[in-house]
Image (tube, grey):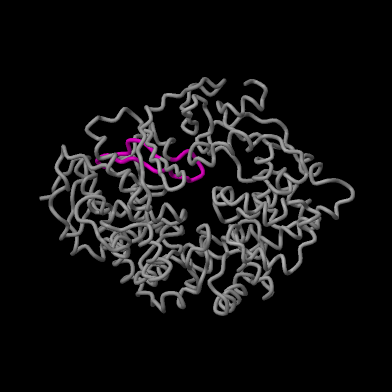
């Protein structure tokens, strides 16, 4: 007789499958293998995803597993996205999923100028370059490929798509993290040794088996959504291991677990399981929908737009709020924003989780709990909507939520970002720093800004234009900045391009591309990555010899220097700039 489970029992069983309750591994590789893989598009978040699924591990252990022991590999796998997987599984996963997603990405590659001939020429060139000098950061790899006769636009999305294509072909993977967590790339076989792929049915059966071990109870539809494979293939995978499965009724829907999965549903009701989960956690990405764990009324607070999934507070499997991490020196603050007022009985567990986040990151952590967000505003023709991307600070001011994520962002948001800049030196500095940010977080650049200013003579174009090879060597040895040769030489080239401008100035050229006024954005998800104006300015700059000035980088410049005002509606800075505050 098929056992029937309530919604609560389904969640509790899945919590245990995800190693969020019950016995948890004490080894990074075991954690990753137990759930097949952890999403790794955000490096720090992928490390934090190990914490609630393990016992006694810390961030340094995850770094060692990835960078030194090589027992864990970052590569493109499920859904064609970057995942952290066990080295022993990489051959099976890439061999099965890589060709599918490489084929699916062809149309986008063609749009980026990566035609079939270029990709075919790029693979042996990548092999040669990385065999000689890997690991290399992406920008330097692209620079070296140009020397091998494979030239692509270094500033748009083409480099990321080319590297992903090479990874899906089983040629490369992420290597050790460089300074500021900048990714590097290596040859997969050199990094972990040859890992032969399994026969198609054997690989599919293993995927279904392992998926259910880390996600059961689940259905073929869940497997298809999580892996990014056709439903027919997922159903075939379940059939291949049918003799190893047990069917359940999961709150009215058929679902399966491995036959040897524990009969119980995890911790008894009344014993709350509270976990702080990071960005892009598998708890929100492991099944075909989130309704079972996330109230649709709060969905925009977790995923405001653009595919970005915020860290979540999970109580007994249901998302009860979001949280963010603030750092001031060696002190961390775990700031929790619950959707509804938390029961007092949950506070000890929340404090324990916050303390464990600090332990994992090697710093003392304190907990703050905000009141439930009720900030609402009336928008003409839009009705009443929750402003989940706004934050009311300790000073009582409402600002864009990102401005309160870490201490360094607060003054930058309040006093700099989006405020008009007309000074030629400051404009040049912002242009250069946006170029350095490519592939990194802005926080990394912001924390190094004073070191950048010292290293690059205050970003005075005339002084930087005079830099020679000795200066480049000095900069490459400067640990205070991002030591990336293509980006460093681009700053020198850009300074010379500024001096060569006789018909206009950098300030005039930038401000000539100000767009027409547009409605204030309501959420971060509405902000574009580039615009026609940024694309036009990027073309103008490139014609004048500037480097690292793709449309996305240029749009970030337009935002930073106030050519566009992308502070959200309701933010006090926007009100000041609009003259209404």
Furthest residue to the left?
A: 1
Question: Can residue 140 be spotted in the picture?
Answer: yes
Residue lying at 52% horizontally and 27% vertically, measured from the top left: 398
Q: In x, y percent, where is residue 518?
A: 66, 31
In this view, the residue in front, 504 or 41, is 504
Q: Is residue 231 above or below residue 71?
A: above
The percent position of residue 501, horizontal first and vertical second, equals 85, 52
Residue under the image location 80 percent in, 44 percent down = 509
> Residue at coordinates 63% horizontally, 49% vertically from top-left?
450
The residues colored magenta run 303-323
Q: Is residue 221 visible?
A: no
Q: Is residue 250 above or below residue 240?
A: above
Q: Is residue 302 magenta?
A: no
413 sits to left or right of 517: left
Residue 47: % across, % down: 39, 56
**Along the line of sight, the residue nearer the viewer: 251 or 363:** 363
Name the quadrant of the C terminus. top right
């Amino acid at each position: 007789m098929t056992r029937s489970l309530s919604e609560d029992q389904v969640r509790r069983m899945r919590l245990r499958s995800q190693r969020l309750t019950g016995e948890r591994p004490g080894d990074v590789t075991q954690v990753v293998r137990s759930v097949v893989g952890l999403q790794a598009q955000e490096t720090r978040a992928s490390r934090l995803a190990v914490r609630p699924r393990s016992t006694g591990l810390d961030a340094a252990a995850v770094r060692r597993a990835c960078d030194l022991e090589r027992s864990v590999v970052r590569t493109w796998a499920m859904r064609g996205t970057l995942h952290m997987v066990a080295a022993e599984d990489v051959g099976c996963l890439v061999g099965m999923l890589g060709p599918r997603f490489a084929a699916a990405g062809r149309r986008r590659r063609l749009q980026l100028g990566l035609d079939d001939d270029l990709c075919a020429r790029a693979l042996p060139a990548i092999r040669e370059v990385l065999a000689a000098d890997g690991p290399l950061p992406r920008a330097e790899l692209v620079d070296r490929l140009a020397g091998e006769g494979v030239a692509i636009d270094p500033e748009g999305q083409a480099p990321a798509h080319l590297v992903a294509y090479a990874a899906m072909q089983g040629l490369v993977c992420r290597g050790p993290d460089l300074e500021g967590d900048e990714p590097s790339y290596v040859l997969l076989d050199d990094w972990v040794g040859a890992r032969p792929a399994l026969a198609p049915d054997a690989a599919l059966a293993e995927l279904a088996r392992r998926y259910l071990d880390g996600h059961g109870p689940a259905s073929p539809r869940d497997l298809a959504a999580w892996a990014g494979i056709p439903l027919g293939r997922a159903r075939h995978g379940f059939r291949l291991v049918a003799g190893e499965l047990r069917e359940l009724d999961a709150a009215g829907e058929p679902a399966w677990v491995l036959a040897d999965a524990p009969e119980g549903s995890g911790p008894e009701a009344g014993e709350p399981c509270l976990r702080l989960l990071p960005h892009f956690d598998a708890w929100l990405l492991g099944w075909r929908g989130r309704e079972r764990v996330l109230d649709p009324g709060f969905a925009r607070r977790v995923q405001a737009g653009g595919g970005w999934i915020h860290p979540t507070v999970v109580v007994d499997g249901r998302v009860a709020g979001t949280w963010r991490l603030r750092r001031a020196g060696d002190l961390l603050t775990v700031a929790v924003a619950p959707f509804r007022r938390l029961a007092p009985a949950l506070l000890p567990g929340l404090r324990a989780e916050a303390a464990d986040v600090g332990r994992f990151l090697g710093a003392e952590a304190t907990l703050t709990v905000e009141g439930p967000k009720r900030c609402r505003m009336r928008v003409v023709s839009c009705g009443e909507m929750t402003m989940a991307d706004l934050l009311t600070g300790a000073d009582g001011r409402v600002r864009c939520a990102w401005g309160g994520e870490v201490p360094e962002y607060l003054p930058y948001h309040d006093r700099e970002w989006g405020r008009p800049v007309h000074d030629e030196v400051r404009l040049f500095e912002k242009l250069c720093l946006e170029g350095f940010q490519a592939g990194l977080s802005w926080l990394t650049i912001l924390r190094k800004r004073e070191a950048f200013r010292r290293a690059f003579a205050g970003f005075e174009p005339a002084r930087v234009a005079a830099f020679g090879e000795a200066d480049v060597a000095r900069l490459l040895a400067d640990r205070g900045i991002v030591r990336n040769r293509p980006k460093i030489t681009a700053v020198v080239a850009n300074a010379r391009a500024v001096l060569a401008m006789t018909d206009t100035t950098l300030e005039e050229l930038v401000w000539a591309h100000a767009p027409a006024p547009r409605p204030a954005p309501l959420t971060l998800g509405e902000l574009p990555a580039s615009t026609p104006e940024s694309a036009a300015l990027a073309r103008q700059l490139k014609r004048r010899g500037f480097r690292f000035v793709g449309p996305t980088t240029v749009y970030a410049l337009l935002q930073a220097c106030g050519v566009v005002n992308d502070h959200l509606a309701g933010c006090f800075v926007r009100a000041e700039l609009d003259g209404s505050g």
